[in-house]
Image (spheres, rainbow, N blue to C red):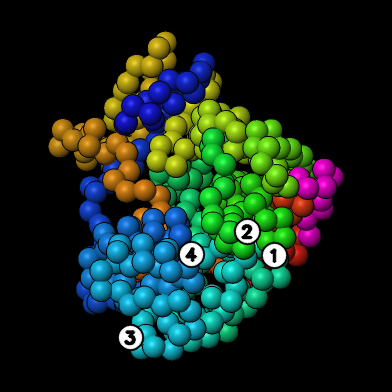
Amino acid sequence: MNETTRRLFLQQAGGAAALALMPALAGRTLVLDEPLQVAVVGAGRQGRAILAELQKIEGLAVAAICDSDASRLESGARRAPGARPFADHRELLAESGGLAAVIVATPTHRHREVAEDALAAGRHVYCEAPLAATIADCQAIVAAAARSGRVCQAGLTGRSNPIYKLAHSFLRSGAIREVVALRAQNHRKTSWRTPAADPAREREVNWRLDPEVSIGLAGECGTHQFDVAHWFHGKYPRRVRGTGAIRMHQDGRELADTVQCTLSFEDGVELIYDATLANSFEGQYEQVAGTMGTIKLCGTAGWLFKEADAVTQGWEVYANRQQFHNEEGITLIADATKLAAQGKLKEGIGLPHPPLYYALEDFVKSVAAGAPLACQAAEGLRAAAVGILADQAVRSGATVEIDPSLFEED
């Protein structure tokens, strides 16, 4: 547990017993039996982060990289030695014969064209989340994936995160009993603005601030966290209320830098969500409160806070215990009995890699070995649709009804 995570734990530990959710991971990375060639389309910040994680997979080669901006393309190419650079993804698809998969990391409103073209060309696709910036574009990607018969994974990393999967297994086992409330936030003090030499370039690189193409904080950030709520609660919201304002960045932008949303589910449970670019306190987290405990997830860490009247389930006897002020925190580790017998219990704490790595690893396993998809395109559509409608609610300040047909199984 690093110092930042420990401080966060100290802030969170309340009157209930705290259990830190940490799976036992050896830190090993995926090794492929057969070489696999992939391309990354989009060499911005997220594309470069993806390139860094792909380098960890032995047997995988980034054969091509694409970006319409020359400086970003050059920067991306430095991170993928040997990859052919392309300014147009259609040229990349036409000239990369041995390519198995394409990872789409362009701005959200440009996902559809790249994903559709790659699927039509017979390539597997990993599409960053949100899946697209309009519901129609999301539906088009889902349809293209179905026609192609190829793997198409939405980049909702919570579904692959080992800590989140462990926490989900505890929820399914009844550890917190009935869900009574959901909460999530994304606080990061930043501007979302990148300096540029001319107005056209400025608008291009600052697409998140362009009201014509951006889906704002509720869409770009909320989509990922709404998906965690859908997964853990096993339900989808029926309506969303929203508000937003510019609280800090008085730089001519039109989109709110601070938003609040309330998502209502048919069983009466509500998800309270807020995001801001004006404050960083407590960062990003998702919280699921139940009648016998609360699960709190923070990307690379998670905790189960048991209620005083919660039944002891037996696994606690194997736990690594830590004292936090007046509370005793029990570190929850997968395979705790085995590790304890080996005297290696504390080695199970933490994630060896960022959450993004595990989502990419799952995608590669699906492509190379036919493993089940961690997050299908249809699930990406459901999460993105909620994010898009939440952004509409924020802009209008009104309640937006969510069509249940968006969540129907194919």
Residue 29 higher or lower than 298, as above or below: below
Q: Where is residue 86 in the image (x, y as percent from the top left)?
A: 41, 77
Mark in the foreground, 3 or 2? 2
How far apart are labels 4 and 2 at the CA level? 23 Å
Q: Does the magenta stretch include residue 402?
A: yes
Under mark 2, the amino acid is: Pro
Under mark 1, the amino acid is: Thr
**Residue pictured at 54% horizontal, 82% vertical:** 117
Q: Which of 265 and 283 is in front in this view?
A: 283
* Image quadrant in which the C terminus is located: bottom right
Magenta span covers which residues?
Answer: 394-403
Q: Which of 316 and 22 is in front in this view?
A: 22
Q: Which residue is disc 3 drawn over? A: 98
Q: Position of residue 324 (x, y in %)?
A: 38, 16
Label for residue 199?
2
Under mark 4, the amino acid is: Ala
Label for residue 105?
4
**Residue pictured at 30% horizontal, 62% vertical:** 79
Q: In which quarter of the image is residue 331?
A: top left
